[in-house]
Image (cartoon, coloured by chain):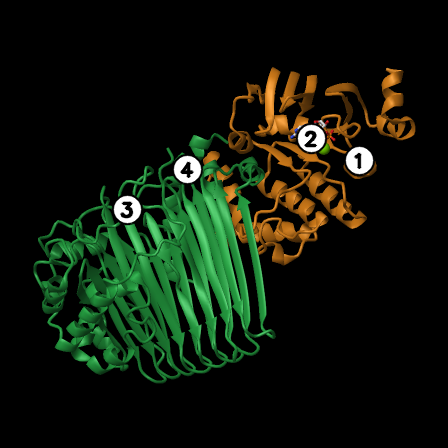
Amino acid sequence: MITLDIQNLEAKIGDKKILNGLNLQLEAGKVHAIMGPNGAGKSTLSKAIVGHYDMTILGGDIYYKGKSIIEMEAEERALEGIFLSFQHPVEIPGVNNAYFLRTALNAKRKHEGKEELNAAEFLRLMKGHLEELGMKADMISRSLNEGFSGGEKKRNEILQMLILEPDVIILDEIDSGLDIDALRAVSEGINKMKDGKRSFLVITHYSRILDYIEPDYIHVLKDGQIVKTAGPELVAQLEEEGYDGIIVNE
Amino acid sequence: MESNELDKAVSGEYALGFEIDIETDVAPPGLDEKTIAFISKKKNEPEWMLELRLKAFAKWKTMEEPHWGKLDYTPIDYQSISYFAAPKQAPESLDEVDPKIIEAYKKLGIPLEEQKQLQGIAVDAVVDSVSVTTTYSEELSKHGVIFCSISDAIRDYPELVKKYMFSVVPMNDNYFATLNSAVFTDGTFVFIPKGVRCPMELSTYFRINALNTGQFERTLIIAEEGSYVSYNEGCSAPTRDEHQLHAAVVELVTMKDAEIKYSTIQNWYPGDEDGKGGIYNFVTKRGLCQGDNSKISWTQVETGSAITWKYPSCVLKGDNSVGEFYSVAVTTLAQQADTGTKMIHLGKNTSSTIISKGISAMKGQNTYRGLVKIGANASNARNYSECDSLLIGSNCGAHTFPYLESKDTMGQVEHEATTSKISDEQLFYLRQRGINEEDAVSMIVHGFCKQVFSQLPMEYAVEAKALLELTLEGSVG
Ligand SMILES: Nc1ncnc2c1ncn2[C@@H]1O[C@H](COP(=O)(O)OP(=O)(O)O)[C@@H](O)[C@H]1O
Ligand SMILES: [Mg+2]
């Protein structure tokens, strides 16, 4: 089953056309890795999926669970289950991390017709996840991303993913800047979310994280297009030959 | 984001704009010696008070309205204002207060009837020029605390009033303070005796109701040695097309080891987005830390008024005395605020803290103006100032004017200032987590104000948050 279906997507940021007829299907229960050189358009693709204000869609379409989403507001896409772990999470001073997360979770629960969680119930949930991710308890009271180290920011993104339980999960360079312990904790968090139904889109430069989260498909993105799709064996080949080698072989 | 969407999100409706339908005694417009005699007579004042008022008036006539504030407004015609308005029925006790006033106060969230009075909060309820009732006065008097209207204090405690009124804000301090000295009508008087920790929160709620009248309140709080009081004021006014003048004076005095915590939630009618109507708010507030180790703390949340001109200040005379100023000022619609503080360090080891948060939206203009002055004998004085501005949209403005005068080179003064826009990245981050735009804006704004709100007493912090929400995003949808 296809969760997210991107068809012939063309998009620009400002005056610059970045996605040039990109096609990609995410399967339910599968992990898709996207690799590609710097500036290829990987972050741009993730922005297009979540409805970032920078993007102008010029052509093509994105279907989520069979419905076109390109006209949907960003918050609607989120409530419907699309989650982006940002490459550079922004700091929001004075906004309590737990308060923010509970607001987000309750917005989603309300959207799904579920009871909202009260503060005590939420804290129990949050504390459990903090422990799993090896995060300090002061993450409850600190301001959202303010003064967080690079690793703390990435773990906090994973924490949000675990709490919000989205259906399509896009991870934009979740592995960059992580030490080995953090990488392991983050990967464990991701693996925990695998349930046979969710789709993952893992954007990365490095094969390192792929040792931990075992992708089903590798896609190579270059010049705003998916230029190659293969199984996990492609990782080793990419390591050896680089992007240019792979594409020349095509 | 579409800028008109943002505007919609920040032009909250004014919820307290109703009128109280009561018969009012209003003095005819105009200001001369006769007006002042009329006010004094209405208040049954002793002769000495009238003389002081007339002295102030004579001085005022020689003064000029100051225009150094970054404020642009149509000139005030002092002769077209009425200087006294009072509900016709003068109540002797709570039973006699017009039920419509009781009803109106209920609507404002302040029940006045005995059975329903707010727990732990005593209220002085002022409508236009008079205090209509004061709750818990008897209970407080058991502790020796005097909590009454300033008019009552002039009659009942003349020695205290003579000693302290004009001692912190001299009669000729500035144009608006001098005007107030001549025509002030009501306000609150508080006296906390030696060693007493006031057993409840004290508060005054000012309501402008009558048309075309000015409100000139005057408040005096004295905290004797080792005493403590937390005092809060709130205010609101009906929605009207005309501007109305409010020129208040507040004086605080703390003796040795005493502390006054003074909080304001200012929600006068702000006018509309074209600048039509709204209160002109010209206020002089000053506290004198007279005794050693005493402390005065001002916290203000300013969301209302078309024009705000206000600098709650501390004169740190006693050694080791402490002054604090925590402020959130919001200007949206066509509001303009020029506000800040003065910290005057005179004693040794005195310290002051200034935390100012300005929020501007739509066509709002927000100016922080602050002075830190360190006198020649104020050895080891310390100040920390932080002035942050948050802009929502692109038609508003934020300005910061911090002044420092120091005669002591050993003092330690730190100043930090930031101006930030609610960034699209921040908004987007929250929206990507499923939080709608309106909630996202309010979350960012509350985060910005956190340091100040945490200074307010619990009940008022809740009110301040709700008010900010109303002011900034009430009308979406
Ligand atoms: N806001 C922007 N304005 C203009 N150009 C941009 C913007 N964001 C990204 N780009 C450009 O788009 C291209 C793709 O960027 P990006 O998607 O971030 O690449 P990747 O994530 O693959 O490294 C780059 O050439 C980058 O410079
Ligand atoms: Mg990128």
Q: Does the residue tagged 2 have its C-beta within 8 Å of any atom of ligand 2?
A: yes
Q: Which mark is residue B9?
A: 4
- The image quarter containing residue A240 is top right
Q: Horizontal and vertical percent for residue B128?
A: 19, 57
Q: Does the residue tagged 4 have its C-beta within 8 Å of any atom of ligand 1?
A: no
Residue holding disc 2: A43
For marks 1 and 2, give the one nearer the viewer: 2
Residue A118 in view here: no
| Chain B, chosen colour in render | green
Which residue is farthest right?
A: A240
Q: The residue tagged with tag 1: helix, strand or loop? A: helix
Q: Amino acid at mark 2?
A: Ser
Classed neighbour count for the residue bearing mark 1: other residues with Cα under 10 Å, few (<14), some (14–19), many (≥20): some
Q: Tag 4 or tag 3, which sits nearer the N-term?
A: 4
Residue holding disc 3: B278
* Chain that bears disc 2: A
Q: Which mark is residue A210?
A: 1
Classed neighbour count for the residue bearing mark 4: other residues with Cα under 10 Å, few (<14), some (14–19), many (≥20): many
